Amino acid sequence: MAEPQSVLVVDDDGAMRDMLVSLLEDEGFQAAAADSASAAVDKVREQDFDAVISDIKMPGKDGIELVGEIRDIRSEIPVILMTAFGSIDSAVAAMQAGAFDYITKPFKRDQVLVSLTRAFQLRALEVENRRLRRAVDKTSSFGELIGTSSAMREIFALIRKVAANRSNVLITGESGTGKEVVARTLHFVGARASKPFIPVNCTAIPEGLLESELFGHVRGAFTGAHTSKRGLFEEANGGTLFLDEIGDMGLGLQGKLLRVLQDREIRPVGANRSTTIDVRIIAATNKDLHKELEEDRFRQDLFYRLNVIPIDIPPLRDRRDDIPALAEAFLRKHAGSEKRSISPETMNVLMSRRWEGNARELENVIERVLALSESREIRPEDLPFSNEFTATKPQPEEALMKTAVEHNLTLREFEDRYINAILHHTGGNKVQAARILGINRRTLYRRGEHDGPSPHGEVHGEV
C-alpha cells in the first residue's frame, strides 16, 4: 500500500494552522505544521514533503522568501501560498518567485484540495522527469544520434550492423529529421572514422558547378579554371561522401555519378585520365524517390545503386518519445555553462506539438527561448507559440460552470463561489462587487460576517 502524500502547513496563526492540518488528515494526507518560515525550512531539510501550504504574511521571513529557500533546498517541492483579497500583488510576486499556486482567503476546502491535487501531479511529473533524464543519459544516444523511441532503437541497431562495411546508404526522411546526423554517426562509429567525412548539399551548389565540385577539374577546362582543383570525391578518399538532397540532382549529373559508383573511378572535368577512389557514398533526400522514378526525374539504375542499405527516419510527430531526450540535448548544447531546465508542464507542451520542422524546429525553439528568457526554468509561457495553448484555455466563467456541474453544487454554493470570484476580480472591494452582482452591499456584508468554516465549506481568515 502506497504511503499517504505529505504536506507541510506553515502559518503563524495557530487556529488556521490547526484547521488546515485537520482538513488534510481527514482527507488521508500526512500533515505536519510549522509556525514560521524558519521552522519550515528546517523541516524541509529533514523531510521530503510532497507539497507545502504557507501563509504569505508572517513575522520574520514571509511566504515569498520561504518559496525561494525551499526551491534552493528541494526545487521539486510545489509551494501553495495563502493570501487575502487585498494582497493580489503579493500573490503575483509569489508566482514570480516560483510558487506553484496561491489561494485567496476566505477559501473553501475544495479549493485547497484541487490545488493540492494539481501540486501532487506536478511533483509526480518532476520525479518522472528526473527518472527519464537519468534513463536518457544512459540509453538515448548513439554517436551523435539521440532518441528512445522504438524507431530510433531500430536505426541504432542497423547502424551497428552496417557501419563497418562500404555499402552505399540511402537515408530518407522529412526535412529536419536529422539525416546528416545519421550519416555522421554511420561514419564516425565505423571503420572509416579516422578518414574524412565530406558533406555536400546538392541544392546549394548550382548545377553547372556541382560536377566540378564533385569530380574536380584541370587547368583550362573551362573559362575561369586558372588552376587545377581536386574534387570532393578525392577529398573524401578513404572516407565518406555525404550527398544531401540527392533527389534534386539533375539527370545529366546523375548519369556521371552512376558511372563513378560502378567503376570506382572519377575523371576531373577536362582531364584525359581517370583516378581510382575508395569512397563510401551516403545519400539523403526528403523527396519520395519512388514518385520521382515514376515521373522520370530520377534514374532507376542510380536509385538501386544508392539504395543498398535504406534508412528511413520517421518524423518527430511519429516518435514523440524522443522529444524529451532531444530537448534536453539541445538545452545542454545552447545553455553552455548556464544552469537551465525545462519544467514538466513545458515538456508536456513540447511533446504535444506536431513539429512540422522536426528536430531542427525543436532545436530552434529551445535556442530562441534560452536567448530571450532570463528565467532558470523554461515555462510554457516562454515558448514562442504559447498563445496557441493559452488561447484555448477555458474562460473563468466556463471553468466556474464546469466546476459547479462536476461537484453537484447547490444553488447557494454556486452563489458563494460566484460572489467570491467577483470579490477576487474587484480586489476585495465590496462596494464595487455589490454593484456588479446587483445586490445591496449590506447583503454582501451580512454574508461575510461569520468567521471560521461556513456551512458551505468556506474558510474565512485574515492574512
Image (cartoon, grey):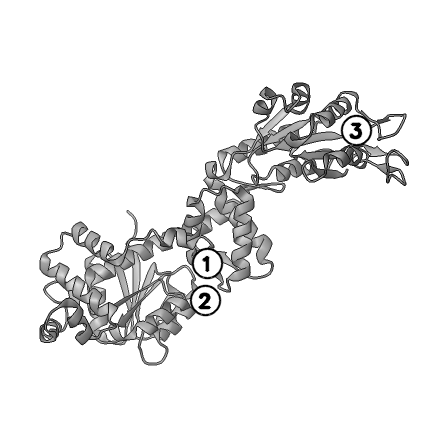
Give residue 209's position: percent from left, percent from top. Answer: 77, 36
Residue type at mark 3 is: Asp
Alpha-carbon distance for marks 1 and 2?
22 Å
Whether pointer 1 and pointer 2 mark residues with C-beta atoms closer than 8 Å, the reply is: no
Residue type at mark 2 is: Asp
Give residue 457's position: percent from left, percent from top. Answer: 14, 63
Which residue matches tag 1? 382
Q: Secondary structure at mark 1?
A: helix
- Categorize mark 3 by other alpha carbons within 10 Å: few (<14), some (14-19), many (20+): some
Mark nearer the N terminus (3 vs 1): 3
Residue type at mark 1 is: Asp
- Categorize mark 1 by other alpha carbons within 10 Å: few (<14), some (14-19), many (20+): some
Mark nearer the N terminus (1 vs 2): 2
Position of the C terminus by quadrant: bottom left
Can residue 185 be seen by looking at this rendering? Answer: yes
Q: Secondary structure at mark 2?
A: helix
Task: From the viewer's perspective, tell me whether residue 350 is left or right of residue 267.
Answer: left
Q: Is residue 452 above or below residue 390?
A: below
Task: From the viewer's perspective, tell me whether residue 90 is left or right of residue 218.
Answer: left
Q: Is residue 154 above or below residue 440?
A: above
Which residue lies at the image location 31% right of the left edge and 55% below the top edge? Answer: 118
Q: Nearer the viewer, mark 1 or mark 2?
A: 1
- Categorize mark 2 by other alpha carbons within 10 Å: few (<14), some (14-19), many (20+): few
Q: Say which of 190 and 242 sits in front.
A: 242
Mark nearer the N terminus (3 vs 2): 2
- The outermost residue toward the bottom is 59
Which residue matches tag 3? 278
Which residue lies at the image location 45% right of the left edge and 52% below the top edge? Answer: 385
Which residue matches tag 2? 72
Give residue 243's position: percent from left, percent from top. Answer: 69, 34
Q: Nearer the viewer, mark 3 or mark 2?
A: 3
Q: Is residue 360 above or below residue 20?
A: above
